[in-house]
Image (cartoon, rainbow, N blue to C red):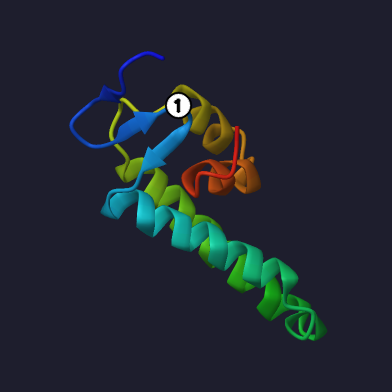
């Protein structure tokens, strides 16, 4: 097994990323996005629901921009393509 890579911000062991504050904040925003999407009661007011979804999406984009340049290429791929469920799984150590 190769030695873990270290870029000063994250530690990668296999495909599990040790979280720093930036990754924790991003993971929290990704979880918030899932909560907004799953909020059936909020869908009764579609305009408000879309505003909440827009706000959390903007938050994710902002947090993504704060990540170090050298992040795991798969995580970058997931984020760039808005594969947020896969990005969250990877951040939580559940993904590929």
Which residue appears at 54% of the width and 27% of the height? 77
SS of the residue under disc 1: loop
Which residue appears at 48% of the width and 61% of the height? 29
Front-lying residue, 72 or 61: 72
Compared with residue 94, is residue 81 higher up or lower down, i.e. above or below? above
Residue 37 placement, left or right of 53: right
Q: Position of residue 86 (x, y in %)?
A: 62, 41
Compared with residue 34, is residue 22 higher up or lower down, i.e. above or below? above
Image quarter where the C terminus lies is top right
Which residue appears at 52% of the width and 26% of the height? 74
Q: Position of residue 90 (x, y in %)?
A: 53, 41
Residue 83: name its quadrant.
Answer: top right
Residue pointed to by mark 1: 14
User: Looking at this rendering, what residue extends furthest in the front direction?
Assistant: 1
Front-lying residue, 73 or 59: 73
Residue 14 placement, left or right of 95: left
Image quarter where the N terminus lies is top left
Front-lying residue, 29 or 15: 15
Residue 94 placement, left or right of 39: left
Q: Position of residue 10 (x, y in %)?
A: 28, 36
Front-lying residue, 18 or 81: 18
Which residue appears at 38% of the width and 29% of the height? 13
Compared with residue 58, is residue 2 higher up or lower down, i.e. above or below? above
Q: Position of residue 18 (x, y in %)?
A: 34, 43
């Amino acid at each position: 097994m190769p030695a873990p890579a270290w870029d000063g911000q994250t530690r990668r062991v296999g495909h599990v990323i040790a979280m720093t504050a930036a990754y924790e904040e991003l993971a929290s925003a990704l979880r918030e996005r899932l909560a907004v999407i799953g909020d059936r009661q909020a869908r009764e007011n579609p305009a408000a629901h879309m505003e909440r979804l827009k706000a959390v999406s903007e938050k994710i984009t902002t947090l993504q921009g704060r990540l170090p340049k050298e992040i795991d290429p798969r995580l970058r791929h997931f984020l760039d393509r808005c594969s947020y469920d896969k990005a969250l799984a990877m951040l939580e150590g559940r993904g590929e």
